[in-house]
Amino acid sequence: MKNRIKEFRAKYDLTQEDLAKKVGVRRETIVYLEQNKYNPSLNLAHEVAKALKTTIDELFDFRD
Amino acid sequence: MKKNKIRLILITTGTILLLVASALYGYLALIKKEATPGGLIPILIPLIVIIFMMFFISKRYKDVKEGMPMEDERSKKVIMQASAASFQFSLYWLLAISWFEPFFARTLFGVEKLDASQTVGGAISGMAIFFFIFWFYYDKKGKLI
């Protein structure tokens, strides 16, 4: 599953650490999310989308 | 935040106590040459735990200082997968210990048979090593179920 977290993060000038603090996860989780190496739970996906002022559909690409 | 700090303090205290106990045991076994059950194998388990805990505590200390959580959904998944994998490997390790017990007894201790504490110590050491190896593997690899 691909995502646009890095793109949205850059749009709001947030570091990975800033985003991690906003969402309430560790920085490594954001790193692995951006590298498409970790699939978040629905709750986490929702929190990340909320922190980046977008929707889950906009942020994540569910196509294989 | 406060909960994380308390957890970190408790973990650090436990690790220091383990270090002190290991140092005392090592002193008795090596310096005073007192007969200690299981020879030096019982030091191996705490040493593995202490080395792992030093990495863990230093990493978590930085996080707690910066206001980051000590664990999240991904870190919990890493521990769960590492535990499952190490459990499976430990079954084979225990079988190997029972099958090759005379070999381990002769090469590691110079005796014909292992006593109960040596066997249990070896089994737990292996399980601890497997867990830490898998913890590092799943943490670095990234792809989790």
Image (cartoon, coloured by chain):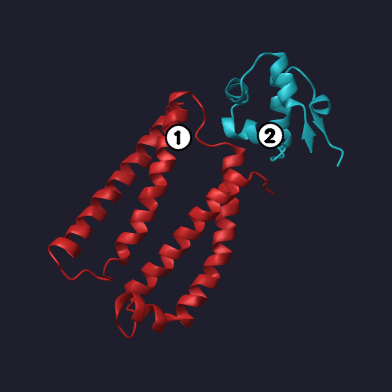
Chain colours: A cyan, B red
Coordinates of residue A53 in the picture (x, y in percent):
74, 17
Left or right: residue B129 versus residue B83 is left
Instruction: Pick out the residue farthest to the top.
Output: A12
Contact check, label 2 and label 1, Cβ < 8 Å: no
Amino acid type, residue under disc 2 in the picture = Leu
In the rendered image, the quadrant that contains the N terminus of chain A is top right
Q: Which residue is mark 2?
A: A33
Left or right: residue A12 versus residue B126 is right
Residue B12, by quadrant, is top left
Residue at position x 32%, y 72% in the image: B117
Distance from label 2 to label 1 (Cα)?
20 Å
Instruction: Pick out the residue farthest to the front.
Output: B107
Residue A56, by quadrant, is top right
Instruction: Pick out the residue farthest to the bottom.
Output: B112
- Please tell me the numbered disc located at residue B124: none
Q: Which residue is mark 1?
A: B60
